[in-house]
Amino acid sequence: MTRGSSLQRRLTVATAGVLGVALCGFSLLLHTAFTRALSRQFDDTLVAEARGIASLIELSDEGTWEVETSALTQLTRGRGSTWFEVRAPDGSLITRSPGLDDGVFPRGARDASPGRRSLILPDGERGRLLELFVPVRGEDGHEVGVSVAVAKETEDLDEVSSLLWGVLALSGVTTLVLATLVGVVATRRGLRPLGALASRVEEIDGARLDLRLPEEGVPEEVRPVVSRLNGLLARLESAFERERQFSADVSHELRTPLAGLRAILEVSAMRERPAAEHRVALAEALGVVAQMHGLVERLLLLARLEARQVPVETEVIALKDLVDTCFAPVSARASERGLHFENRVAETAVVKSDREKLRLILGNLLGNAVEYTEQGGSIQVSSDLSRGLLLDVEDSGPLIPEAALERVFERFYRADVSRTGTAEHSGVGLALTRSLCGVLGARVHAENRAGGRVAFVVSVASTSVLLRTSEPVDGPRAPMK
């Protein structure tokens, strides 16, 4: 199994990477700005020296150039000395630094704007050259332009630039290391609640699903996850509780018929009996077995439906005929209890669905209505496919308690205070109905209506499950009994 990378490591690396890029960019910007400022200052010094050199040269009335040699000599002494060369407008040499050979300085200054370039000085050091066209005043007041080329060593400038790089690199690395350490500590403290949550989750097992994860002190970004996990735990607890209750209910439901079956067999075996009495006892036993078999079959189908292991096979169904067909098995019981049945489904109501599953839904709803409707009451079935109303099974009551309208669809739930039938029921019919509706893309609910009437309504979220509502389907109809 491939292990995922640590969240703390990823956050630390990401923070260090972003900070490192930011520091590099800031250092480069700062170094560039600082070295440019130094270069401008250096060039300003060269311009000042070029003008100073030009001020030491004068054109005599005889047309000769007079130079204050002693002052110019001071520029060539010591560390950081200046190399210079001055030429007349015709290109002839006026003066230059001692030891400066011809051709070392390139020639080309022809205007007042300075020209700058780097070069190797005669002493082998790196230097910077500035060429400037400077006007010189003659004795008669007439100005004549001379070309002054000035160069100085850039060793100090290079040292400052290198030192700045070193300072910036050292400070950047130090800042990056400190920021990384702070990031490690911060992310570790920030992720500490996740460790506490993990420990809390480890405490939860099948026997302690009532535990919940604490939301207090949890980072805001993690709180929605904790909330959803608590919701999941609540649903799991509810599901486990339902399963435990289901097991208890199944045991209870099977214990009663098993006890009856045992009693029948024990009584039959106590003494010799005529064959007729044994046949009666066997018939009673078969009835109990049939009841148990029906319960087991319904439970098995319910489990398969909840596991989505039951395929859906659709076909065109005439809804009115199907209602009549499903009422036929319970019509005798309805007559016995004096119930009036009315099928109000339109002749043209046609749907495309799974016939067997729809038959089971109708059978459960009609059987439930026949069993629980008050003596001498009425039952009616209607449909309005244009509004997505697939089935509406309504009876004359009594009403279902409001608190039980939703719970009647739970397995083995019975509202004891009202609607108590007289026949044996498995207790899973309505639960099975809801699961069948879910498989068919429908939903079912119970509601109390005016006049003390009760209805079980099956509707569809989308009318795409309906085929048409105006064309009858050919074929014989089952008579209503």
Image (spheres, grey):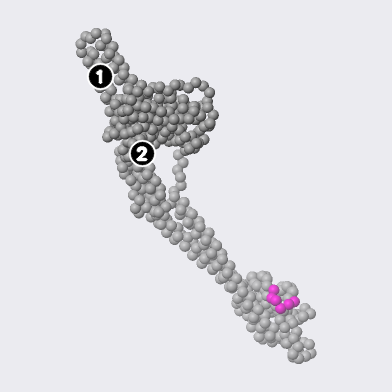
Q: Main secondary structure of the magenta part?
A: loop
Residue 347 position within the rendered picture, expressed as x and y whole percent measured from the top left: 49, 28
Q: Residue at x 51, y 33 (%)?
A: 466
Residue 242 visible in the current orientation: no
- Quadrant into which the C terminus falls: top left
In the rendered structure, which segment of residues is drawn in magenta? 110-115
Place residue 116 in its image quadrant. Answer: bottom right
Which one is nearer the viewer's eye here, 408 or 52? 408
Classed neighbour count for the residue bearing mark 1: other residues with Cα under 10 Å, few (<14), some (14–19), many (≥20): few
Residue 157 position within the rendered picture, expressed as x and y whole percent measured from the top left: 59, 72
Residue 447 visible in the current orientation: yes
Image: 96 above or below 401? below
Q: Residue at x 49, y 21 (%)?
A: 476
Callout in the foreground (2, 1): 2
Q: Which element carries disc 1, helix, strand or loop? A: helix
Report how far apart the C-alphas of labels 2 and 1 lie in the structure. 47 Å
Which one is nearer the viewer's eye here, 55 or 413? 413
Residue 341 position within the rendered picture, expressed as x and y whole percent measured from the top left: 39, 27
Q: Is residue 111 magenta?
A: yes
Which one is nearer the viewer's eye here, 346 or 275? 346
Q: Which residue is mark 1?
A: 262
Q: Which residue is mark 2?
A: 450
Three-letter residue code for mark 1 = Arg
